[in-house]
């Protein structure tokens, strides 16, 4: 018996910004979700200028502390070695045995989903909510339809495009502005800004 609808929003959150928070809140509202789980990824040695996983987890915790509908899990930031989505979903499934799970992804991820480890198993455990950025018009609508139909027919995936009219804001832009001593006001929560400053991150 389903008693909760949970959205899972994963990412490096390097750092988390207001676009991430707004995405979580708008998708929660539009899809009538009870909770949004923020799932910071573990350390990624192949990525440059990425803050340690524990710091990214702490920043997400600070950013979400005033929203009772947001939960932050350290499943991946506490895991040694590589983190795979299937492992995290299994843990969340055990934590919330009566919940219906929805994995929130960006449009770019839609085109690489089939490469995820154990994707055929993932689709049995969660549906996908695809939230495009405003600039998604650069992607051919026909290509989105073809990819969605391919995943649905080939893997029996459940996919829904959720239009949120989000403004374009990226962690890359935030890091650039911090490095160059430019303002990040209204881009990241004040608590996160103070944390970054105290830890001298992204300089």
Image (cartoon, helix red, strand yellow):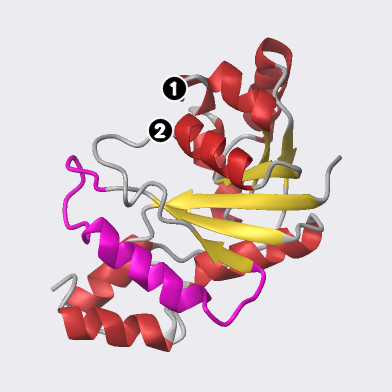
Query: Is there CB contact under 8 Å for labels 1 and 2?
Result: yes
Helix, strand, or loop for circle 2? loop
> Which is more toward the observer, 72 or 157?
72
Q: Measuring 74% from the left and 45% from the top, which residue is drawn there?
A: 99
Is 97 a magenta residue? no
Give the side of residue 84 with respect to residue 145, left or right. left
Q: Does residue 71 sit above or below 109 in this rendering?
A: below
Q: CA distance from mark 1 to mark 2?
A: 7 Å
In the rendered view, would you say 192 is above or below 165? below
Residue that numbered label 2 is attached to? 84
Q: From which residue to which does the magenta span run?
A: 43-69
Element marked by disc 1: loop
Q: Whole-percent x and y of residue 173? A: 33, 67
Is residue 165 visible from the viewing direction of this image?
yes
Q: Residue 44 vs residue 155: left or right?
A: left
Q: Which residue carries the number 1 mark?
A: 117
Give percent across and percent down for residue 203. 13, 73
Q: Quadrant of residue 146?
A: top right
Could you tell whether 120 is left or right of 193 in the image?
right
Residue displayed at 46% across by 76% down: 63
Task: Establish if 72 lies above or below 46.
Answer: below
Q: Nearer the viewer, residue 106 or 25?
A: 25
Mark 1: few, some, or many residues within 10 Å (few <14, many ≥20)? Answer: few
């Amino acid at each position: 018996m389903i008693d909760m609808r949970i959205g899972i929003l994963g990412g490096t959150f390097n750092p988390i910004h207001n676009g991430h928070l707004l995405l979580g809140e708008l998708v929660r509202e539009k899809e009538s979700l009870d909770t949004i789980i923020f799932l910071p990824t573990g350390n990624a040695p192949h990525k440059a200028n990425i803050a340690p996983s524990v710091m990214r987890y702490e920043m997400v915790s600070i950013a979400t502390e005033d929203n009772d509908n947001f939960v932050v899990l350290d499943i991946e930031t506490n895991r040694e070695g590589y983190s795979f989505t299937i492992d995290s979903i299994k843990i969340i499934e055990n934590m919330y045995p009566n919940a219906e799970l929805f994995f929130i992804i960006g449009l770019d991820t839609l085109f690489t989903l089939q490469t995820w480890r154990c994707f055929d198993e993932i689709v049995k455990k969660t549906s996908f909510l695809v939230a495009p950025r405003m600039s998604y018009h650069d992607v051919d609508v026909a290509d989105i339809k073809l990819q969605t139909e391919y995943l649905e027919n080939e893997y029996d995936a459940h996919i829904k495009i959720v239009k949120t009219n989000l403004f374009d804001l990226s962690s890359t832009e935030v890091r650039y502005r911090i490095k160059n001593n430019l303002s990040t006001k209204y881009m990241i929560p004040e608590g996160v800004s103070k944390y970054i400053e105290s830890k001298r991150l992204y300089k």
